[in-house]
Image (spheres, rainbow, N blue to C red):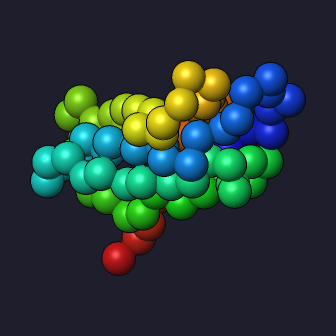
Amino acid sequence: MPACAARSTQTTFARYIVHHAHGDSFVDRNQAEAAGTWISLGRFTFAAGSDGYIQLRNLGTGDETSIWFDAMKWVPVRP
């Protein structure tokens, strides 16, 4: 989560949709509590040459709620 000086409130209900080898997983996070830190979305299997991706949605309420993204860190895990 990037640390952003926002004029609006950061969302408390960000939904990350992880499209991986076994389908889609929904991961909900509170961005207001996680600003300035890395947050884990979990462990997922991605197939080589596939169209794996992560989508981010703001499910928070209020007109002044912001959602932020900066980078994804992919860490290979060996069995």
- Percent coordinates x, y for residue 64 in the rendering: 63, 25
Q: Residue at x 48, y 47 (%)?
A: 13
Quadrant location of the C terminus in the rendered image: bottom left
Is residue 8 or residue 43 the one in the foreground? 8
In this orientation, does residue 49 appear? no
Is residue 67 or residue 46 the one in the foreground? 67
Horizontally, residue 48 falls left or right of residue 13, namely: left
User: Image quadrant of residue 16?
Assistant: top left
User: Image quadrant of residue 70?
Assistant: top right
Is residue 76 or residue 41 the one in the foreground? 41
Horizontally, residue 3 falls left or right of residue 73, namely: right
Residue placed furthest toward the bottom: 79
- Percent coordinates x, y for residue 22 in the rendering: 14, 53
Residue placed furthest toward the left: 22
Residue placed furthest toward the front: 62
Residue placed furthest toward the right: 5
Q: Residue at x 38, y 64 (%)?
A: 43
Q: Residue at x 37, y 54 (%)?
A: 27
Horizontally, residue 9 falls left or right of residue 43, namely: right
In this orientation, does residue 31 appear? yes
- Percent coordinates x, y for residue 26 in the rendering: 29, 51
